[in-house]
Image (cartoon, grey):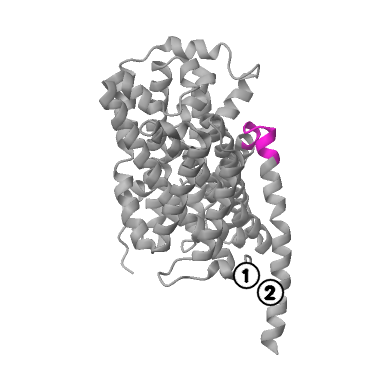
């Protein structure tokens, strides 16, 4: 196949997949941290750049592979790869719950009745199943819908971020910093902010997926991944910080549509409605993309005999329907268990769970990079090996720091999610042996 994707197309892929719903409630989540949130942003950005460089190396080592699962399997075999796929899959459908919560928060601007927890939950679940049906119709349909949504994602971020800087009042952030989310140390605050903001960076590995269709992938992908990560981080920091400087922290912490509220201050009622509509569209595009992902992740592991074979079964449109539907059922149950009128608080919980289940595969990949270097499976110079090792170590330490910052409760539930998957691996191995005996006669 002729290689088509160059630097700008790869950069657009990274930026488009990273910018999703996570950013649209983040100003409210970070309001209690005030000026200290900038240190957390700096840590999250630096850690994400290390992760981007790590994936850039891994794609050179395994240019035809499609993500953390394949890298982990190459370095550590089936069991570690299974745990990686299990967590990565959980990150996808847990992430969809966070997206749906954000979508409902901005939709309340147009439908105030969604402030009722039951109505809000039903609306969120309705969107989940709508995009499940869209994806069941085939990747072409889902991709066409997603492309339109992606083109509109940057509008509310850039508009509010740039205009908001002209109305920035540092006193709002300083006042918030005086009493930051409880009496915690600066280090704890920084790590907690990094954990919250990290949800907005998930997807930075996107350019590694189509490596075989990229011009000079060993050069293009590292540059595009690092550039895309830094570019997106700048947009994030400018827009979120601008809103924190515009709206008093006490009011911002309670807002379920902070970008729309900021637009209302800047441009009046019309701006408020336009930015809210833009955020709804962006959330819809993200929900569509993650719905596609939540079916594809278990399919890869199922084909290798690590997940139930039924999750690899394709419908007449070539979509892994069973995996997609099973994931949406799990999202529905998660939302029904704890949907309430405090959307910011619920978003924080779900986003932290989604982030942690994504950070575990990232940690696996950082360790896998070191293992590949130790095994000398990829010919590299001594200088490049030192740089790759340093990057992997920093990426691994960052994942540990972000996990620490998420807090005990999020780490506890994430550990339970990880352990809950082990019996299925054992069952799958037993089924594989039974099926092998039957096939042998």
- State the image quarter where residue 192 is shown: top right
Q: What residue appears at the point 60 percent right and 59 percent down from the top-left corner?
A: 376
Question: 166 above or below 10?
Answer: above
- Which part of the image, by quadrant, shows the C terminus? bottom right
State the residue position of label 1.
305
Q: CA distance from mark 1 to mark 2?
A: 7 Å
35 to the left or right of 216: right
Which element is circle 1 on?
loop
* Magenta residue span: 403-412
Picture disc at residue 432 = 2
Secondary element at image label 2 = helix
Dot 1 or dot 2: first in sequence order is 1
Image side of residue 296 versus residue 286, left or right:
right
| Disc marking residue 35 | none
Task: Evaluate if marks 1 and 2 touch, with contact meaning CB atoms under 8 Å apart.
Answer: yes
Q: Magenta span: helix, strand or loop, mainly?
A: helix
Res. 390 visible in picture: no
Quick one: label 1, few (<14), some, or many (20+) residues within 10 Å? Answer: some
Q: Quadrant of the N terminus?
A: bottom left
- Whole-percent x, y for residue 348 in the image: 56, 33
- Residue 342: x, y in percent? 54, 29
Residue at image x 54%, y 19%? 32
Locate residue 236, reporting x and y percent: 41, 31
- Report the front residue among 14 and 34: 34
Residue 233 sits inside the magenta stretch: no
Residue 51 visible to the viewer? yes
- Residues 57 and 98: in front is 98
């Amino acid at each position: 196949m002729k290689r088509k994707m160059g630097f700008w197309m790869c950069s657009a892929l990274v930026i488009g997949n990273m910018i999703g719903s996570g950013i649209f409630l983040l100003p409210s989540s970070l309001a209690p941290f005030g000026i200290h949130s900038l240190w957390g942003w700096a840590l999250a950005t630096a850690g994400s750049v290390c992760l981007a460089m790590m994936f850039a190396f891994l794609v050179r080592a395994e240019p035809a592979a499609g993500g953390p699962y394949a890298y982990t399997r190459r370095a550590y075999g089936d069991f570690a790869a299974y745990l990686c796929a299990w967590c990565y899959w959980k990150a996808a459908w847990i992430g969809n719950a966070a997206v749906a919560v954000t979508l409902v928060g901005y939709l309340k601007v147009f439908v105030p009745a969604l402030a009722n927890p039951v109505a809000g939950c039903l609306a969120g679940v309705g969107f989940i199943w709508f995009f499940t049906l869209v994806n069941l119709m085939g990747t072409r349909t889902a991709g066409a819908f997603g492309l339109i949504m992606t083109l509109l994602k940057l509008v509310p971020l850039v508009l509010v971020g740039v205009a908001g800087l002209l109305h920035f009042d540092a006193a709002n952030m300083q006042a918030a910093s005086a009493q930051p989310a409880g009496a915690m140390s600066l280090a704890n605050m920084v790590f907690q902010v990094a954990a919250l903001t990290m949800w907005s960076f998930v997807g930075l590995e996107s350019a590694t997926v189509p490596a075989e269709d990229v011009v000079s992938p060993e050069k293009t992908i590292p540059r595009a991944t690092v550039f895309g990560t830094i570019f997106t981080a700048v947009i994030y920091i400018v827009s979120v910080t601008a809103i924190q400087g515009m709206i008093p922290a006490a009011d911002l912490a309670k807002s379920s549509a902070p970008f729309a509220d900021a637009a209302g201050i800047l441009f009046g009622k019309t701006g408020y409605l336009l930015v809210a509509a833009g955020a709804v569209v962006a959330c819809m595009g993200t929900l569509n993309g993650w719905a596609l992902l939540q079916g594809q992740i278990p399919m890869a592991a199922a084909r290798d005999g690590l997940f139930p074979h039924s999750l690899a079964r394709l419908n007449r449109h070539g979509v892994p329907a069973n995996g997609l539907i099973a994931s949406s059922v799990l999202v529905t149950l998660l939302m029904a268990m704890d949907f309430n009128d405090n959307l910011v608080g619920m978003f924080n919980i779900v986003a932290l769970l989604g982030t942690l289940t994504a950070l575990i595969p990232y940690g696996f990949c950082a360790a896998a990079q070191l293992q590949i270097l130790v095994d000398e499976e990829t010919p590299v110079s001594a200088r490049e090996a030192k740089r790759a090792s340093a990057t992997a170590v920093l990426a691994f330490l960052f994942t540990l720091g972000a996990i620490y910052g998420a807090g005990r409760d999020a780490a506890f539930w994430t550990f339970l999610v990880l352990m809950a998957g082990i019996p299925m691996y054992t069952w799958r191995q037993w089924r594989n042996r039974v099926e092998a005996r039957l096939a042998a006669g």
